[in-house]
Image (tube, grey):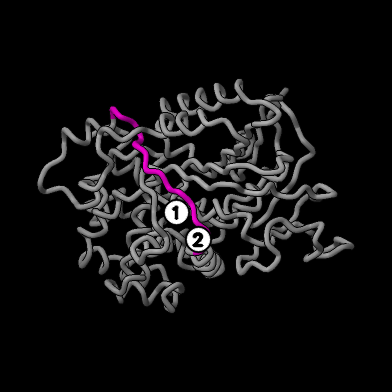
Amino acid sequence: MSAASSPLDWAGRCTQQAESCAELGSPLYARLLSLLAIEVAQTGPTWEVIAPWAELRFGQAGPLRLLGAAHRLALSGAAPSWARVLPSCGGEVPITNGELISVWSELVRTHGQELSDGLDYEVQTNEVARSAGLALGLASTAFNSARLVELGCSAGLNLRLDQFCIELASTGDSEGVGSSSKLLGDPRSTVRISPELRTAAPHPLAQLPRVTERIGIDPHPLDATTEQGRLQLLGFVWPDQLQRIERCKAAIKIASSVPAVLMQSALMQSALMQSADSASEGETEQVSARPPVALPDTAELLESLLADEQPTVIQQSIVWQYIPPELRWRITAVIEAAGRRATPEAPLAWVRFEPDEWDRKRAAVWLRTWPTGTDFLVAQVDYHGRWIAPQQAISTR
């Protein structure tokens, strides 16, 4: 076993994720992950659940995979004892850590194999509130219309961002929240997103281009209109954050009436070859359902889409860490090659909502456009969209 897959390494991952959960407003997960860090370091029962998946990369968010599997069991009704401590299921979080870890231990005893199997599912949060940052980037392109392509789309909820009501007015704004000049998207939408503004929004606020087509690319795309897809999405939303859960449910309803094409990709052909070589009859259903070796990877699918030159915006949000490094370079090369072919009649833009290089406690939205080739900072943002700080076009060129 390598140092990067040892119990101590995973205990550190749990501790780091606990700190992130505390920062992002989930005291339940902050407490639970801190307790699990101790148990995993001591190679307790939770480590036995994790051990078959110990080689997962740090960026694959193993602790969140584990807790997502537990949440799905509660939401489905399969783990009523665990459901009783989750607000998302109508439960109440135990006051003491002893009570909390006791209920978790019961879950591990009764559903250990299901929890372990659940570690095979990629984290697919599809956080809808991130659409405020994405939409500000989309509006900043100044395109009249565009095809919208999302990398790592999951269920593609944020492909429908123009169907949400995004309010970008501060409480002290003389025009006030709800002013048409401070709205992006549909003011009648059941999905309303009102992040705290930490700097003033651009004025006048450019409007979103008309979306001509919605295309998502993901190794494991979800159909949120099915019960299984809905359960998987909601399972990855933190159970003590009820507003996020209700917003996700509302976005799923919109997705059922606003079509999008979700394309399945391979992560990497070489990785799939290894998966195929190691496949056996006893593997879980999720493993056997992985894409076939012949499936194009994300770079290849994107290249085929961009060969059809038309106004296009590519967007992504907290997806880069889940993509193997060698594939990131190929995706970037494909986009830059398409950028060199872009014209004023068929422009290209790339909106990236990813961790901020200067402060990892926040994310940053960058916009690169072609044929100009400019790349500028649109906003600094909270990972879950709680706040946004629009910037004044800080360019790298």
Residue, disc 1: 155
Residue type at the position of mark 1:
Ala
- Contact between marks 2 and 1 (CB within 8 A): the answer is yes
Residue visible at 26% across and 34% down? 272
The boundaries of the magenta stretch are 257-270
Please give the name of the residue rendered at 46% of the width and 61% of the height, measured from the top-left corner.
Answer: 237
Residue 324 figure quarter = top left
Residue 369 falls in which quadrant of the image? top right
- Left or right: 38 as drawn, with respect to 259: left
Residue 67 drawn above or below residue 278: below
Q: Is residue 267 magenta?
A: yes
Q: Position of residue 320 (x, y in %)?
A: 49, 37
Front position in the image: 44 or 364: 364
User: Residue 389 lies in magenta, yes or no?
Assistant: no
Residue tagged by mark 2?
255
Report, in whole angstroms, how far the alpha carbon at label 2 lies from the one at label 1.
9 Å
Locate residue 169 relative to residue 94 in the image: left or right: right
Type of amino acid at the residue the image marks with label 2 = Ala
